[in-house]
Amino acid sequence: MLQLVREVPIRIVIQGALSSRRGFLFHLAVGFSHDIDPLSGMSVNLMFVDEWLWKLKKDLEKDPFISSRESLNHAFAEIMAVTRLNLTQKAAELGVILSSLTFREERGWSFSWNSSQAPEEMMFQYKHYIESIPKEGAFDLIRFAFDWERVQGCEADYQHEGFLLLKPIANKESEVLREELAKVVGHVLPSGSTLKNVQIEYLGENYCLTLP
């Protein structure tokens, strides 16, 4: 079974329960899975997929999204639910499986879902940067990507939670920092959301690793 991924930009405006409106530019990547058609060599008809995404884009951009709560996580979960239901129904008409959804915001963070997760589960990813302190030689700029698995109802600020975990170890040498970060993978918030993994990218050295 082959997976096809198509991407479309979507501008979404969210009106919080108390705050002013906020605008987000997302790049929505959608994965569909299906057996390859031996005649066409395709797994999914691209004309249908592009039409689905164009209609979804128009619907999501039409009016501001009104959130019943102030938490952006809650608003994003509702947007994900609407998108998943819309595309699952469209795909089912052709016997195709919706396998993944990723909303990547232009400013670098994202939230996603895949078919191995329950409908109410999501992953949030936020990136952080620090300068390493080397024993010798030039410093390196390190980018961390924290992947949080959200449980239903969690309204935690995952970006802030990542800052809290990095703060006590930010001035450590690279080797020590990596060892300390390995210890926080699996960290569970009071809500039940979990830090599933941490990706460490050494930008000056051009290599990366994932913990655990």
Image (cartoon, helix red, strand yellow):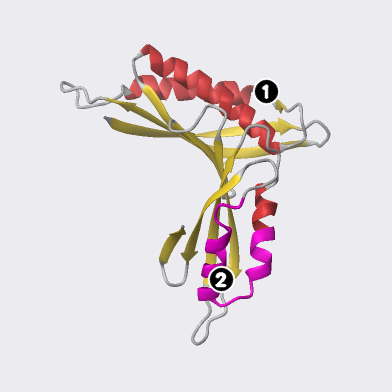
Mark 1 or 2 closer to N-term?
A: 1
Assess whether residue 69 is covered by the magenta stretch.
no
Spot the residue most to the top.
Answer: 93
Report crowding for label 2: few under 14, some 14 to 19, many 20 or more residues within 10 A (C-alpha).
some
Q: Which residue is mark 2?
A: 177
| Amino acid type, label 2 | Leu
Query: What is the quadrant of residue 36 in the picture?
Result: top left
Residue at left offset 28%, top offset 32%: 2
Query: Between marks 1 and 2, how big is the CA–CA gap?
Result: 45 Å
Report the front residue among 204 and 158: 158
- Residue 160's label in the rendered image is none
Q: Which residue is mark 1?
A: 63
Magenta: main secondary structure: helix
Residue at left offset 56%, top offset 62%: 183
Name the secondary structure under disc 1: loop
Across and down, in percent, residue 149 comes to: 56, 42
Q: Which residues are magenta?
A: 164-187
Across and down, in percent, residue 142 comes to: 53, 67
